[in-house]
Image (cartoon, rainbow, N blue to C red):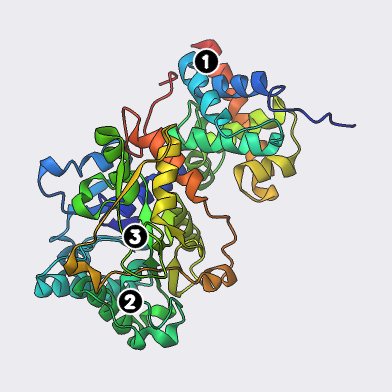
Amino acid sequence: MVIITGGAGFIGSAMLWELNRNGEENIIIVDDLGSTTTGQWRNLSGLRFADFIAKNLFPDLLERGALEGISAIIHMGANSSTTETDADHLLSNNFGYSKKIAAYCMAHDARLIYASSAATYGDGQNGYSDNIDGVDTLRPLNMYGYSKQLFDRWALKHGVLDKASGLKFFNVYGPNEYHKDDMTSVVFKAFHQIGEKGTVQLFQSHRPDYLDGEQLRDFIYVRDCTSIMAWMLEKPEVSGLFNVGTGTARSFKDLATATFSALGRQPEINYIPMPETLRDKYQYYTCAEMAKLHSAGYNKTFTSLEKGVKEYVQHYLAASNPYLDNGKKTSHA
Amino acid sequence: MTRIKKTPLDLLDDIYSLAYWMTGSEDTSRDLVNRTYLYANTKTRETDLLKTFRECYVDQFGQYTDFCISEKTCHTPLKLIESLRQWAADIKFSVLLSEISGLKHRQISEIVGKPVDTVRLWLFWGRKLLVNDIQLKASA
C-alpha cells in the first residue's frame, strides 16, 4: 500500500494519476480538502484510490500502528504558500508533521519520498546545486523555504536522507493546480488573461541586464515530476536530495508566447511595473542543476516548454474536464 | 522477412483497429486516434506513434480495459493473476501489437516501456487469457 499525503493537492493528485496509469490503486490519500469552493476535491474525482484519511488524524493512526502494509509514503502535503506569514503554522505543518512521517518510515523500513522545495535556495547566491554538503549554507528568502530547509537539515542530521529522497521542485505547471489561487502557474494565469482581455501582463525588469519578461525560471511540467517520483518508487536505493527541474532556464516571455501559440494566437504581452515590495526579493534567474538525478540513473527526456504548455492548454485548460482523469470507462463496461 | 516501413498515414487503420479493440467504442477510438496524431508528422516512426497511442490510452483509462483475468479460467497462482490484473491494458495492448500489427518483442518492449522478458511473459499469459476472454464473450 502506498500513502500520498497532500494527495488531493497539485503534485499529489498528479502522482495518484501516475500510479493509476500503472494499475496501482491500493493507495491511501491523506489531505485536508478545505472549503468546497476551492474545488480541490475535483482533483480526486476521476482517480482511483482505496481510502481517504483526514490530515490531522493521520499521524495518530501511524503512531498507533493502525495502518498495516505501508510500502511507501509519498509526502507532498505542506502549506506551500511563499507568502504565508504565520511562522508557527508553517513550522508545525511543514517541519513537525514531516518529522513524524519520517520517523515512521525509518522505523518500519517504508520508502519515503518527500517534497522539499527550490525555495530553499533563496536568492540563488550559493547556486542551485543539490549537493548534500551545501544544505547548511542555503539561505531561504521566506518562511516557507525555511520550513522546508529545516526538515532537509533534520533529515540529513538523523540519517533519514540515507534512505529517503527529498525533491526540490522548481517551477511546476500543469493540470490540477486550479485550487492554488495566487500560487497557480503563469500558464494558468496567462490562459485566463488571454481569454478575458486578449493580452498577458508580465512584470517589467528592474535590472539593466535583463529585458522585460526575460526573467528566467526552470519551468517543469507536472508529468515530468510524477515520472521522476514513479521511477524513484521503483528504485529504493536512490536516496538523498534531488533537484526536480529540467536543467534549462526559460523566460516568462517564452512561457506566455507558448500559451498564445497553444491557443493559435499572436502574442500580445504588456509589461507592468513590479510592486516596490517585491523588487528587492525578486529572483531574476533560477535553474536546477540536474547532474545528480541523471547520474543516479534517471534518463528520460524532459518535456519541452512548448510541448508541455501545448498539452496543458489544449488537453486540459481548454477542455470540458480540465482535471487529470484516467478513470474513464470504455464502452465495454 | 523484410518489414516495409510504414508512414503514420499507412498506420491509421491499424491504430484505429487497436483503439477499437481496446475501447469497443467508435467515438472513443476516434478521439484516441485524433490525440495520437496531434503530435505526429510524416517522419514519425511507427514505434513512436504506437508509444504515443499507448500514452494517450493510459492517460485516459489507466490500466482499465475489458479483459477477464480470472484464476478459474487460466489456472495460475493468485499472485501472478494479481500482477497481470494490475497491467491489464498493457498486456492486452502487447498481445494486439504482436497479433494485429505483427511487431517484434523488442519493439513492443520499447512501446510499453517494459523489459523484453516481461513482454514475453505478458504475451504468453495474455494470449491464453484473451482466447478465454473471447470465448466467454462468444458464449454470453
Q: Is residue A27 left or right of residue A34?
A: right
- Identify the amino acid type marked 2: Asp
Query: Does residue A22 show up?
Result: no
Q: Quadrant of the C terminus of chain A?
A: top left
Q: Which mark is residue A123?
A: 2
Q: Are marks 2 and 1 in contact (CB under 8 Å)?
A: no
Quarter-wise, where is residue A241 in the image? bottom left
Label 1: state its secondary structure: helix
Label 2 packing within 10 angstroms: few (<14), some (14-19), many (20+): some
Query: Of circles 2 and 1, which is in front?
Result: 2
Name the residue: 12% across, 74% down.
A87
- Residue A46 point in image, percent of width and height: 31, 36
Label 2: state its secondary structure: loop
Q: Are marks 1 and 3 in contact (CB under 8 Å)?
A: no
The residue carrying mark 3 is: A69
Label 1 packing within 10 angstroms: few (<14), some (14-19), many (20+): few
Query: Of circles 3 and 2, which is in front?
Result: 2
Q: Are marks 3 and 2 in contact (CB under 8 Å)?
A: no
- Identify the amino acid type marked 3: Gly
Q: Which mark is residue A189?
A: none
Name the residue: 46% across, 58% down.
A250
What's the chain of the residue with tag 3? A
Q: Nearer the viewer, residue A130 or B60?
A: A130
The residue carrying mark 1 is: B137
What's the chain of the residue with tag 2? A
Q: Quadrant of the N terminus of chain A?
A: bottom left
- Residue A188 point in image, percent of width and height: 31, 44
Position of A44 relative to A250 (above/below): above
- Residue A243 point in image, percent of width and height: 44, 69
Label 3: state its secondary structure: loop
